[in-house]
Image (tube, grey):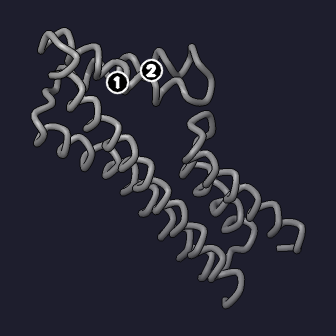
């Protein structure tokens, strides 16, 4: 692959990493797609191995980013119904407020559901704090996967 091609793949991976932090972009999926394009052009053993690693990391991160934070929230006493309301409001928020709508919608939905369930701000606030922590953990999980994909690609480009 030409130097220009490698730079474009690197930029796509960087945009994917930014997409983890800015929910308007498809994050890890974009990192994976950039590695896929690179592997299809390179057609080397190293490229296919990196694509396999990237595929496993991308798939694993998509599962773990929901399971681990969700389990922590349930352990903190936040019921499934509250998580469902938070998720539904996050989807609406994604379309209503660009970039930060999903985040605000999830946290706001959890707060509203807990306030309705528990009847006061003081009772609803701890669940909202757990929701904020869960969102942060989910972002860290996805960012970690994206960084590992980027590192695997960069290692293959530099050393293979």
Q: Quadrant of the C terminus?
A: bottom right
Residue position marked by numbered label 2 in the rendering? 91
Mark 1, secondary structure of its residue: helix
Q: Quadrant of the N terminus?
A: bottom right
Q: Is residue 2 above or below residue 158?
A: above
The residue closer to the viewer here, 36 or 151, is 151
Label 2: few (<14), some (14–19) or many (≥20) C-alpha neighbours in 10 Å: some
Q: Residue at x 55, y 29 (%)?
A: 100
On screen, residue 58 versus residue 127, left or right, reads right
Q: Quadrant of residue 88?
A: top left
Q: Is residue 56 left or right of residue 134?
A: right
In front here: 76 or 56?
76
As drawn, 138 above or below 8: above
In-image side of 128 versus 72 (left or right): right
Q: Are marks 2 and 1 in contact (CB under 8 Å)?
A: yes
Residue sitting nearer the eye, 64 or 42: 64
Image location (x, y in percent) of residue 154: 66, 77
2 relative to 49 in the view: left or right: right
Q: Residue at x 64, y 82 (%)?
A: 156
Q: Which residue is tagged 1?
A: 87
Residue sitting at 44 percent across and 48 percent down? Answer: 139
């Amino acid at each position: 692959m030409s130097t220009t091609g490698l730079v474009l793949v690197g930029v796509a991976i960087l945009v994917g990493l930014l997409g983890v932090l800015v929910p308007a972009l498809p994050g890890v999926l974009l990192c994976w797609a950039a590695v896929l394009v690179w592997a299809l052009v390179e057609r080397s053993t190293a490229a296919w191995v990196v694509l396999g690693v990237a595929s496993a990391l991308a798939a694993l991160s998509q599962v773990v980013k929901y399971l681990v934070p969700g389990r922590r929230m349930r352990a903190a006493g936040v019921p499934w119904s509250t998580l469902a309301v938070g998720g539904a409001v996050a989807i609406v928020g994604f379309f209503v407020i660009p970039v930060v709508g999903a985040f605000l919608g999830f946290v706001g939905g959890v707060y509203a559901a807990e306030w309705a369930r528990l009847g006061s701000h003081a009772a609803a606030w701890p669940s909202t704090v757990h929701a904020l922590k869960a969102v942060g953990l989910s972002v860290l999980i996805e960012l970690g996967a994206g960084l590992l994909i980027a590192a695997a690609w960069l290692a293959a480009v530099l050393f293979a």
